Amino acid sequence: MCSFSKNILIFVSLVLFSSSLNFTKEQKKKEEPKKASVFPKLNQVVLNSKSEKKKEEGKPKQVVSEKKTRKRIKGEIVEKQEELFSFSIAGRKFAQGELLFLKIKPLPKILDKLGNFTINWEGQEIPFSQKEGYILTFLPISPEFSKSYGVLELTEKRLFTKNDSKKYEIPVQKTYFATSKVSHLTMDKQYTSDELSEETKAFIKECSDAKAKAFQSKSDLQVESDFEYPVHNPILNSPFYKRRIYNKEKGRPHGGSDFKGGIGDPIYAINDGTVILARPMYYEGNFTVIDHGLELYSLYMHQSEILVKTGDKVKKGDLIGRIGSTGMSTGPHLHLGLRVLGTMIDPLSVVQTDLIEGRNKISRK
C-alpha cells in the first residue's frame, strides 16, 4: 500500500512538472510576438536610412567649372559706427600674412569737404581711392607681424567732433606656417654654384633694377570685383611662407603660393590691372607683374610663355601666360605672389574670400 501511494505521488509530480513546462512554453509563445512586433520597426528605420543614402549616392553630382565658380570663404568683418562716418574691415581672417579691405563711408554732407584726410596702418601712411561715396584701401598684415593687434589711425578734423584723428586696434591672430624637412633638392647647377660669372651677376642686377622700377608704379584702384584663381584647376603644391629645413638649417620662407600644372597650361589674370613687367628674369624665370592699384601687385613666375607685354591693360580672367619651369624651379608649376605696400601677402587670402563684394560675413564688432 505504501508502495502504491509512492507511485501515485510520483505520477502526480510528473504530471504537474509537465504542465508547468507546457505553461512556460505557452508564456514564451505569447511573449515572442511582442518582441517580434518591436524589432521590425527598428529594422525598418535602419533600412530606410540606408535606402535614403543609396538614393543620395545615386543622384548625379553637380558638376561646376573649375574656374571662377569655386565657393569662397565667408571670412570675417569688423564694423564701426561713428557720428559722421562708418567703416568696415573685411578679410579671410585677421591674421599674419593676410590682406584686409578697408571701406569707409562718410556722411554725404561731409564727403566733399574732406581735405587732408589720411589713413595710417601701423604708422605707415597708405594710399586710398574714393569711389561712389566710399573711401577704399587695403591693409596688409605682414607674415612677421608680432603683436596681437594692429593700429589703424584715421586723420581728418571734419570726421571727428572732438579730435583731429582717432586710433583703432584691429585684432591680429598668429598664423602657423608650414615647414618641411628636405634631404635633397634637384636644382640647376647655376643656382647652387658658389661662384657666378660676371655675365650672370650683371643679369641678376639688371633683373633687380627692373623689379625696383616696376614697383614704383603707383595707380588708383583698378579692380571692381573680387579676385579669382589664376589657373583652371587650382591644386596647391606649396603654401605661402612655408620654410624648408635642409641639413637642420631653415631656408627662406616661400613668398607665394605654388599651383600644380603641366607645361603649357593657361595662366589667367587674377583681377583687372595694368601689366608693369613682362620679361625673363634670373630667379623668377619668365615673369609677369600686374598692378591692380593702391600698390597691390600680383606676380606670376616660372612661365613657359609670356602672352602680354608691359603697358597692356588686362581684365580678370584674361589669358596672360602659360605654366612652365623657367628660372629657379624644380618642375612645372605657377608661383603666384601678392605684394601689397612692399609686403608679401598670402595670395589665397584674396582669391578665396569675398573681400570687395563681401556680404553676410561673420561680424566681429
Image (tube, helix red, strand yellow):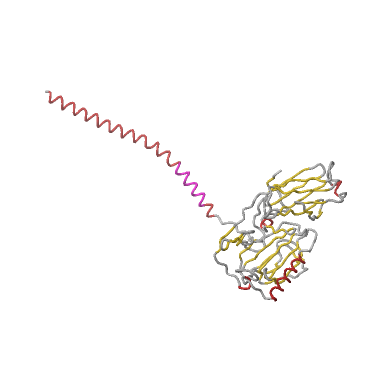
Q: Is residue 331 above or below residue 229?
A: below
Answer whether residue 243 is magenta in the image: no
Q: Is residue 59 above or below residue 79?
A: below
How many badges with numbers are in the image?
A: 0
Give residue 16's position: percent from left, percent from top: 24, 29
Location of the N terminus (image quadrant) = top left
- Res. 9 image quadrant: top left
Give residue 108's position: percent from left, percent from top: 85, 47
Describe residue 80's horizontal placement relative to residue 330 as left or right: right
Give residue 125's position: percent from left, percent from top: 79, 54
Q: Is residue 111 above or below residue 193?
A: above
Magenta segment, which residues? 42-54
- Foreground residue among 173 and 129: 173
Q: Residue at x 72, y 58 (%)?
A: 343
- Res. 304 image quadrant: bottom right
**Residue that lies at the very extreme toward the left in this rendered image:** 1
Answer whether residue 51 is magenta in the image: yes
Give residue 256's position: percent from left, percent from top: 66, 61
Location of the C terminus (image quadrant) = top right
Q: Is residue 111 above or below residue 199?
A: above
Main SS, magenta residues = helix
**Residue that lies at the very extreme toward the top in this rendered image:** 1
Q: Residue at x 47, y 45 (%)?
A: 46
